[in-house]
Image (cartoon, rainbow, N blue to C red):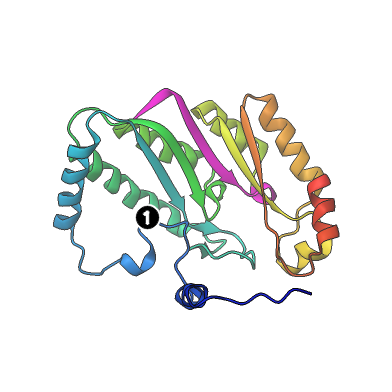
Amino acid sequence: MTETTLSDNDIELLKRYNKPGPRYTSYPTAPEWQNDFSHKDYVKQLAILDKKRDTDSLSLYFHVPFCEERCLYCGCHVIIDKNRIYVDKYLDYLEKELAIFSQNMTGPCKVSQLHWGGGTPTYLNEAEIKRLYNSITRYFSIEEDAEVAIEIDPCVTSKSQIKVLRDLGFNRISMGVQDFNTSVQEAVHRVQSLELTTDLIDYARSIGFTSVNLDFIYGLPLQTVESFNETIHK
């Protein structure tokens, strides 16, 4: 066996990155957030953005932070509650944010990419899904060839919700799977059958979703190379 010797530079690099860091999925990352960032500061940043963007299209991401149950692998900011009393209040604030944003932009706000993530965006019922989408289109113009995408949990998403999304203009759907092995699913509290997932994939494609993708996670409890390979094969 050949022995590998690390250089001083290698060791310094390992020391530099051998510590907890913020999740890459949020930007600005959490350590950059400050409690003293005011409405005035926000408007100032919007003015800077407005000058830079010229007439370029925007990409918008909406984080819907609600879930009915906690998946044990999740590191996202979520509110776990079967009581839906928070949804209306959350949508109220989102609408205020949309109004502030658009009021501080000069010229049309065209959108080439729109993405809803979470949490579980389909925690919203059909009326709430329509409300949020209509709030967005009140202030922003979705381009004809825009990618309009949403992340869903097949366990809590109905075909009627998927139909509403397609009717509104969504054309890309991302389904969380993580793993099809029953033992792994039970360990991470996300039990989801292959048949349920396949049925929703087929339905989404049949009504016009042109892009369907699946999320998988490797490194979960009880996974092996062989079991994960079987999941991918399925």
User: x, y (%) of residue 21?
Assistant: 46, 70
The kind of secondary structure the magenta stretch mainly shows is strand
> How many other residues sit within 10 Å of disc 1, few (<14), some (14-19) or many (≥20)?
few
Residue 180: within the magenta? no
- Look at the image and tell me in which quarter the N terminus lies: bottom right
Task: Name the one closer to the observer, 31 or 163.
Answer: 31
Q: Residue furthest top?
A: 144
Q: Which residue is mark 1?
A: 89
Quadrant occupied by the C terminus: top right
Residue at image point 66% right, 75% down: 4
Q: Residue at x 64, y 49 (%)?
A: 153
Where residue 223 sits: x, y (%)?
A: 79, 65
Is 43 on the left or on the right of 165, as rendered?
A: left
Q: Is residue 224 visible?
A: yes
Up-down: is 115 above or below 90? above
* Residue at the image point whose x is 21% and y is 39% from the top: 52
Residue 234 makes an appearance in the image? no
In this rendering, position of residue 83 left or right of residue 43: right
Q: The residue tagged with tag 1: helix, strand or loop? A: helix
Residue depicted at x 64% and y 64%? 71
In percent of width and height, residue 152 lies at 60, 46
Drawn side of residue 1 relative to residue 37, left or right: right
Place of residue 146 in the rendered image (x, y in percent of width and height, measured from the top left): 45, 27
Q: State left or right for residue 1 relative to residue 169.
A: right
Q: Amino acid at mark 1?
A: Lys
Q: Which residues are magenta?
A: 141-156
